[in-house]
Amino acid sequence: MTKITKIIVGAAVMMCVACTSVSAIATLTLQDSLGNVATVSDVDGDGVVTYNAALGSIWTVNVTTGLTKPLLGDSDNPSMDLNSINVSTPQAQPQYSRSGRLLAPVDYWLDITFTDTGFGVGMPATILADIGGTTSGTVLYQTLMDGNLMTSMLFNTTPFSGSDSAAAWMPDDFSLTQYVRITHKSDQTRSTSFNATLNVPDGGMTLSLLGTAMLALGMFVRTRKA
Ligand SMILES: [Ca+2]
């Protein structure tokens, strides 16, 4: 077997492994600074998970939706979307010390984690992260691959938007996570709304890599015949 033939066979095997990746269940988790946790899993496998309820006594409004494969993208072309509006409500008043001094507001935070697994790219690729929204606090948006931090953006103005990217070697079966931490001061009712995406546009790279290999083989054959 020639070296180039081996490369093409290797590429075909990688693609085959990728296309047979097992489907996995996407999970959406909300956790607040008091330890309240809510988890929603995509048990029906349609690529949509939604949490629409209060969480504990602070985060009184949460409408959070995660979208992933098979609705968006597929195992070889990861595409995830996390959309959320979250409102925090001040706790029992008054926030004064016994001596009548106004206490400084504390930070309430809410972690929103959306994870899907069973992605299979099996080659170099780029993670693209985008987010936009409004907040009366701060928003941290990070993406992770197999739990490893890939991109990170922090916003403390409103409205906000940003993009970040990271190159990585994608294994054959990996997880992707969108992680957002919202932080609100406790002094008044505050809200944050955002839409965050995570894309790995590798499909073009897969085809171009195969195309390059085929082109190289053609040139090799022509060279041998010449
Ligand atoms: Ca679902």
Image (cartoon, rainbow, N blue to C red):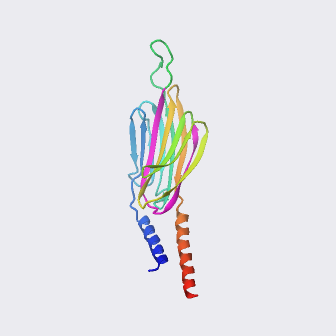
Query: Which percent across, then down, holds residue 116?
Result: 43, 52
Magenta span contains residue 108: yes
Identity of the residue furthest to the top in this view: 99
Q: Main secondary structure of the magenta part?
A: strand
Magenta span contains residue 157: no
Identity of the residue furthest to the right in this view: 159
Q: Is residue 217 above or below residue 49?
A: below
* Residue drawn at (48%, 35%) of the image: 61
Q: Is residue 96 above or below residue 189?
A: above
Query: Which percent across, then down, holds residue 78?
Result: 49, 57
The total of numbered circles placed on residues is 0
Q: Is residue 214 above or below residue 54?
A: below
Query: Which percent across, then down, holds residue 58?
Result: 45, 30
**Residue nearest the observer in this picture, 81 or 155:** 155
* Residue drawn at (44%, 22%) of the image: 92
* Residue drawn at (48%, 27%) of the image: 106
Q: Which residues are magenta?
A: 106-134
**Residue 201 found in image quarter:** bottom right
Query: Which percent across, then down, holds residue 143?
Result: 49, 48
* Residue drawn at (52%, 43%) of the image: 141
**Residue nearest the observer in this picture, 219 or 115:** 219
Where is the C terminus found, in terms of image quarters? bottom right
**Residue nearest the observer in this picture, 121 or 191:** 121
Q: Is residue 20 left or right of residue 207?
A: left
Where is the N terminus found, in terms of image quarters? bottom left
